[in-house]
Image (cartoon, rainbow, N blue to C red):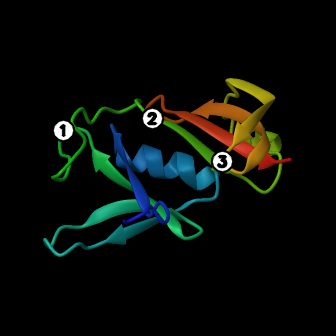
Amino acid sequence: MTSILSLDHLVLTVADIDATVAFYSKLGMTAATFHPADGTSRTALKFGNQKINLHLAGAEFEPKAHRATPGSADLCFLVTSDPTDTLNAYGIQIVDGPVTRTGATGPITSIYIRDPDGNLVELGVVI
């Protein structure tokens, strides 16, 4: 029987790729252009060994989510320290937190923000 090993990437459908890259760059991700076998150029956000592929709303790559819609995601990223100062420095509004939550590996202290498309982004520090 096959079992899941890890998450390789996820896809966000966005209204504006440049705005999304600018936002997530403030959180420490880097933009990368990659060229799949079909000859197209695509944009991704990289952090650690993971990436988020970006699809422009209305021009998504096939195959795609059944209802590819900007603002429909709820994401949680683990961070190395309390992100409040960074968020304040960039004028990013905190929606909620800090609050204690349970992450995949145990307790985390989370702060919630929204990206340019309205996706809920949770930034969690392992307790």
The alpha-carbon separation of the residues under discs 3 and 2 comes to: 17 Å
Q: Mark 3 or mark 2: name the one nearer the start of the chain.
A: 2
The alpha-carbon separation of the residues under discs 3 and 1 comes to: 33 Å
In the visual, does 114 lie left or right of 32? Answer: right
Residue marked by disc 2: 73
Given residues 92 and 103, the one toward you in this image is: 103
Q: Return the x and y of residue 15 as percentages of the image width and height.
A: 33, 37
The local secondary structure at tag 1 comes to loop
Within-10-Å neighbours for mark 3: few <14, some 14–19, many 20+: few
Residue depicted at 58% across the width and 37% down the height = 121
The local secondary structure at tag 3 comes to loop
Q: Mark 3 or mark 1: name the one nearer the start of the chain.
A: 1
Within-10-Å neighbours for mark 1: few <14, some 14–19, many 20+: few
Instruction: Answer yes or no: is residue 94 visible.
Output: yes
Instruction: Answer yes or no: is residue 86 visible.
Output: no
In the visual, does 99 lie left or right of 8? Answer: right
Rendered position, 40 above or below 87: below
Residue depicted at 69% across the width and 43% down the height = 103
Q: Which mark is residue 92?
A: none
Within-10-Å neighbours for mark 2: few <14, some 14–19, many 20+: some
Residue marked by disc 3: 104
Residue marked by disc 1: 58
Query: Which quarter of the figure has residue 19?
Result: top left
Given residues 120 and 56, the one toward you in this image is: 120
In the visual, does 60 lie left or right of 87? Answer: left
In the visual, does 50 lie left or right of 35? Answer: right
Residue depicted at 43% across the width and 32% down the height = 117
The alpha-carbon separation of the residues under discs 2 and 1 comes to: 17 Å
Rendered position, 41 above or below 111: below
